[in-house]
């Protein structure tokens, strides 16, 4: 049987003068810092990452009874592994069936899409050099601030494909969108501190849309909690009067 993982069932919250607001770390910020924090919050909430306050984000932000959880029916390993949700632009780190963390990512464009696959980590490198995609671009050396890989690279083994990986970035404003040549870009802090140290060569990496992931047994929910049906009150049975008062004409009653 699979494992039902409750990630963030009832999230921390507070009530302001304007009503209920779910706890967050972006509403008191501005500019790119606010956008950055909002994207990370959306990822933690299993929401599509946009960096903007859209209808789904408002629902999660202002709905008091709200649930966020993952269900993995058949994890590929009891150890650490990764799921990239192409519909929501998120990366989830799992240990077996338990979600350990969720992060916003950049994915491939319509013409250079991120493939859907059950892949594995093929290699891992710190401070990688970038080869320029076989002559398409000018190669960039390691430790160069213009290196689009950032300072971490996890190459993926995908049947019939090559050159794809999970790495850092030099364009953080593009996180949460479809801008890459097919690779998965992360905020540099996230991959350097939260993902790279916890992964190893051979670890499974599943990449797919919501529908594809669900067909593989990975469900990532974010929704208002359904109201529990109130139990129907049972009507008390009418008790039979065991000592009925006999009605009789007043004239038939004896007077004392």
Image (spheres, helix red, strand yellow):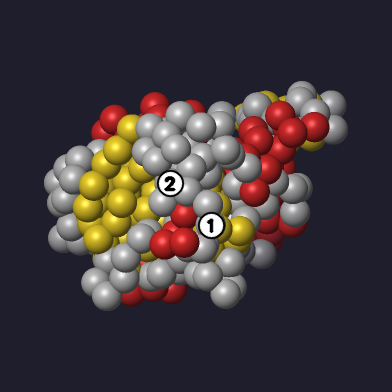
Q: Position of residue 195 (x, y in %)?
A: 35, 36
Name the residue: 68% across, 43% down: 173
Name the residue: 33% across, 33% down: 126
Q: Look at the picture and state if 146 lies above or below 17.
A: below
Residue picked out by circle 1: 137
Q: Position of residue 171 (x, y in %)?
A: 63, 42
Q: Is residue 225 left or right of residue 93?
A: right
Of 17 and 152, the residue lying toward us: 152
Q: Is residue 58 left or right of residue 4?
A: right
Q: Position of residue 4 (x, y in %)?
A: 29, 52
Residue picked out by circle 2: 130
Q: Position of residue 81 (x, y in %)?
A: 26, 48
Name the residue: 16% across, 50% down: 202
Mark 1 crowd level (few <14, some 14–19, many ≥20, 10 Å Cα): few
Name the residue: 41% across, 56% down: 84
Mark 2 crowd level (few <14, some 14–19, many ≥20, 10 Å Cα): many
- Determine the CA span between mark 2 and mark 1: 9 Å
């Amino acid at each position: 049987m699979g494992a039902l993982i409750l990630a963030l069932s009832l999230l921390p919250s507070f009530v302001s003068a304007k009503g209920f607001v779910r706890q967050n770390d972006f509403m008191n910020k501005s500019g790119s810092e606010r956008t950055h924090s909002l994207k990370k919050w959306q990822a933690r909430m299993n929401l599509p990452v946009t960096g903007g306050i859209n209808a789904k984000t408002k629902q999660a932000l202002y709905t008091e009874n709200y649930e966020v959880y993952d269900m993995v029916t058949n994890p590929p390993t009891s150890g650490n592994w990764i799921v990239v949700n192409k519909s929501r632009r998120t990366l989830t780190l799992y240990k077996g069936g338990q979600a350990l963390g969720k992060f916003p990512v950049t994915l491939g464009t319509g013409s250079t899409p991120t493939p859907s696959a059950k892949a594995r980590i093929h290699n891992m490198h710190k401070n990688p050099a970038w080869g320029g995609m076989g002559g398409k671009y000018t190669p960039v050396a390691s430790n160069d601030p213009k290196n689009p890989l950032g300072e971490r690279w996890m190459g993926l083994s995908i049947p019939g494909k090559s050159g794809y990986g999970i790495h850092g970035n030099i364009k953080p404003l593009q996180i949460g969108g479809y801008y890459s040549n097919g690779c998965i870009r992360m905020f540099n802090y996230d991959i350097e501190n939260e993902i790279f140290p916890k992964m190893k060569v051979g670890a499974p990496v599943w990449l797919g849309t919501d529908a594809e992931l669900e067909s593989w047994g990975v469900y990532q929910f974010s929704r208002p909690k359904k109201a529990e049906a109130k139990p129907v009150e049972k009507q008390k049975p009418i008790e039979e009067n065991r000592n009925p008062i006999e009605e009789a004409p007043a004239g038939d009653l004896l007077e004392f």
